[in-house]
Image (cartoon, rainbow, N blue to C red):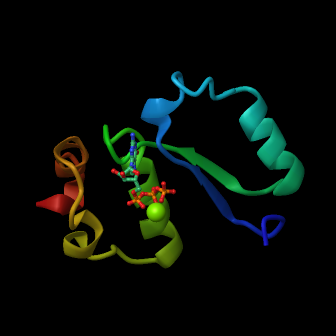
Amino acid sequence: MFQRAQVVVIKKMDLAAAVEFDREAAPRNIRRVASNATILEGSAKTGQGIEGWYAYLVQTVGREPSLEVVTRGLPQPTLRSLERLPSAG
Ligand SMILES: Nc1nc2c(ncn2[C@@H]2O[C@H](COP(=O)(O)OP(=O)(O)OP(=O)(O)O)[C@@H](O)[C@H]2O)c(=O)[nH]1
Ligand SMILES: [Mg+2]
């Protein structure tokens, strides 16, 4: 399953420093297992990386996912970063 992954999303990046997440080693280790996977980082809490994840979904699914579904229950910083997307209006 992991070998065939097309995308790996590293989540909760707002906690990276606190848990001493190794930003150099992580992608290297992921590449060992899934050499061609797209690697994305982000945080649902701060909204970091949400645009990239959204763009990946649009590109991969081939159409825009429903924003109503995508944004349901998201915290305010995340919603604010989504407001900057052209399709969010
Ligand atoms: N700090 C932080 N907490 C998060 C983030 N995303 C989800 N959480 C918290 O993680 C807990 C689990 O929430 P889920 O919605 O299941 O999120 P998830 O990404 O599936 O996380 P896990 O289930 O823990 O793997 C909740 O307490 C969320 O508030 C994030 O980006 N940063
Ligand atoms: Mg969960």
Number of dots carrying numbers = 0
36 displayed left or right of 56: right
Name the one closer to the observer, 75 or 78: 75
Identify the residue at the far right of this view. Answer: 32
Q: Describe residue 40's horizontal placement relative to residue 80 as left or right.
A: right
Q: Residue at x 38, y 38 (%)?
A: 48
In the image: residue 7, left or right of residue 5? left
Figure check: 53 above or below 17: below
* Quarter occupied by the N terminus: bottom right
| Vertical arrangement, residue 19 with respect to residue 72, above or below | above
In this view, the residue in front, 59 or 80, is 80
Which residue corresponds to the image point at 86% horizontal and 54% vertical from the top-left? 33
Q: Quadrant of the C terminus?
A: bottom left
Residue 36 rendering spot, x and y as whole percentages: 79, 56
- Tell me residue 8's x, y (percent): 64, 55
Can you name the residue that lies furthest to the left here? 89
Q: Vertically, is 22 above or below 38?
A: above
Spot occupied by residue 26 in the image (x, y as percentages of width and height): 73, 36
Foreground pick, 86 / 9: 9
| 84 to 16, vertically: above or below | below
